[in-house]
Image (cartoon, rainbow, N blue to C red):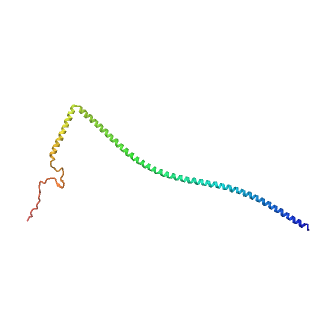
Amino acid sequence: MKNIKPVFIILLLLGFAFFSAFKYFSALKEKNSLLATVEKLNIEIAALGSEKQKLIQSLQQEKQLKDQTVLENSALQESLKASAGQLAQIEEQSAQAQDKLVALESYLSLLKVESSALKNRVAELTSKNEEYNACLNSLPELKKAIRELKMRLSKTQIQRRTGAKNNVEGNNGFVVRNGKSTLPAQVKIEVKPAPAKE
C-alpha cells in the first residue's frame, strides 16, 4: 500500500500535468486564433478608415460642387433678370419703333398725295406756261393781253380814287363805337301826355 500511494500521486500529478498542458495548448491555440481575428479586424478597421476618408473627401467635393452650382445658379438668375429687363426694354423700343413706322407710313402716304397734287399742279402750270408762251409769241394775242391788263389797271385806279373820296367820314359799319352812337340824331321825338278829359 505504501507503493500505491506514491504511484497514485505521480499519476495524479501526471494527469494534472497533461490536463494543464492540454489546457495550455488549447488556450494558446485560442489566443492565436483571437490574435488572427484581431489582426483581421484591424485590417478591416484600417480599410474602413481609408474608405471613410475617401467618403469624406468625396462629400467635401460634392459640397464644393454644390456650392459652385448654387453660385452659378445665382449668377444665371441675375443674368436672367437682367436679360428680362433688356428684353422688356427692347420690346418697348420695338413698340415705339412700330408706332414711328406707322406714323411714317401715314406721313409717306400724305406725301404721296401731296406729290401727286404737286405733279398735277406742275402739269397745270406747265400747260398754262405753254399757253402764255404761245400767247406771248403771237403778236395779236400779246396785244389782246396788253389791252386786258390796261383795262384791269384802269379799273383798280378808279376804284382807289373813288374809295379815297368816299372814305372821308363814316361809321365803318358800326352802329355803336366806343360807347357812342355813330348815327347822327336827325329827328327828336318827344311824347307828352294828353290832357285829361273832364
Going by the picture, which residue comes out furthest to the bottom?
1
| Residue 66 place in picture, x, y as percent | 57, 54
Which quarter of the rendered picture does the C terminus lie within? bottom left
Vertical placement of 8 versus 60: above or below?
A: below
Q: Quadrant of the N terminus?
A: bottom right
Occupied quadrant, residue 195: bottom left
For this rendering, which residue is in front, 7 or 186? 7
Q: At 51% across and 52% down in the image, what residue appears?
A: 75
The answer to whether residue 71 is left or right of residue 188 is right
**Which of the two residues, 94 or 185, is positioned nearer the viewer here?**
94
Q: Is residue 93 above or below residue 30?
A: above
Q: Residue at x 70, y 57 (%)?
A: 42
Numbered disc total:
0
Q: Is residue 47 above or below residue 198?
A: above
The picture places residue 28, in percent across and down from the top left corner, at 78, 59
Q: Position of residue 98 (x, y in %)?
A: 41, 46
Q: Which residue is at a point 31% across and 39% down the rendered structure image?
A: 118
Q: Is residue 156 left or right of residue 85?
A: left
The image quadrant that residue 70 belongs to is bottom right
Residue 34 drawn at (x, y percent): 74, 59
Position of residue 136 in the picture relative to residue 48 (left or right): left
Residue at 17% from the left image edge and 55% from the top image edge: 180
